Image: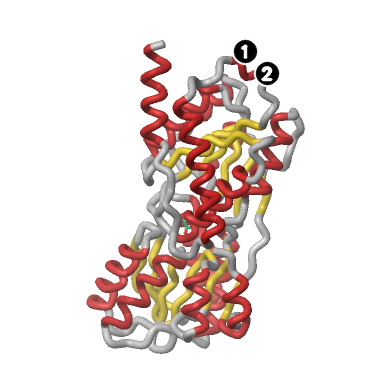
Amino acid sequence: MKKTLAMLTGLAMAFSLTACGGSTTAATTAAAAETTAAAQTEAEKAPETEAEKSGNDKLVVGFAQIGQESGWRDAETNDVQWYAARNTDTIELTFADAQQKQENQIKAIRNFIEMGVDVIVFPPVVETGWEAVLTECQEAGIPVILVDRGIDASAGDDLYTTMIASDHVWAGEQAAIVMNDLLGGKGKVVELEGTVGASAAVQRKKGFDEYIAANCPDIEILDSQTGDFTRSMGKEVMESFLKTYDDIDAVFCHNDDMALGAIEAIKEAGKKPGEDIKIIGVDGVKGAFEAILAGEMNCTVECTPILAEQIFETAAKLKNGETVDKWIMSADGVYTSDKVTQEVVDGRQY
Ligand code: GYE
């Protein structure tokens, strides 16, 4: 009993339920609040014993979210909570926010194992350090779906069941192809990297840098530093790049939030973003589309956060013992300024 209470307190602490980002509609915010209430009530109840669980035919999913570092992340959270809130007759979602800390994600996953959920879903904040907890999931017989980021291949891909994510190497390559066009094959570029050790950052960098090295002899990458996928750090690091180099022609940002931060830094330095310094981001959030329409940004490579339907459908298949592909890849597009109209901006849900 003590153990149960301690665990519940831990769980309740893990439920930092997101107040959603600025681009959310009232409807999704309301839905998120609904799920929040459901999740909190769930946390207050005693976790199900295996016996109780066998009487529960709902799909019980534990989602250990990274945090709220970007508009993209908020959009993914909203989508998952919105979907679960609309399917409460078949789905029971327990959602934890790890506040960007791997140790919190691991704690949340261990709580889900103790609760005996049907399927565990999480985006690994970094690529390494998951062997122990994923082995525990395996020993408990709980399938694991990685979403939007992967784990280090050397850890072995039998540690998880499937991954639902975009191809981040492809995104980096697409950004490099557009960069080459924007610069007419010649110029000096800086790079704002995502969270150190996150697959989305490692792979976007690999795709971009390798394409430039192999195909663009007159494009030089002057510097590359992390902005941790946040707007504030993107701005800060761009400010320091602008102080160090007076000849920057373009910036490749591993996500749109950092690109939006870089735009502010460039304006404050008295230059025109999108013209004096070209800007490419990744994600395809509404703010980036608005910046492209305003001529202050040149391109965003899409990486869809709308994954809920795939996540829950895949989880249902795994609960039924079906096998699924090891990598369920999202289909994404590349948005240069010629493709971004007011209609496209208005049509963006996130
Ligand atoms: O691009 C970024 C977010 O893992 C794909 O994480 C995701 C990335 C996304 O914070 O904005």
> 327 or 15, which is in the foreground?
15
> 44 or 330, which is in the foreground?
44
What residue is disc 1 on?
Answer: 51
Residue 8's mark? none
Q: Amino acid at mark 1?
A: Ala
Q: Percent x, y for residue 9?
A: 37, 26
What residue is disc 2 on?
Answer: 55
Name the residue located 60 percent from the left edge and 34 percent from the top edge. Answer: 92
Is 348 positioned to the left or the right of 103 in the image? right
Quadrant containing the N terminus in the rendered view: top left
* Disc 1 CB within 8 Å of nearest ligand 1 atom: no
Can I make out residue 78 in this image? yes
Q: Percent x, y for residue 107?
A: 41, 30
Marks 2 and 1 in Cβ contact (< 8 Å): yes
Query: Real-space Cα distance between discs 2 and 1?
Result: 7 Å
In the rendered view, would you say 195 is above or below 215? above
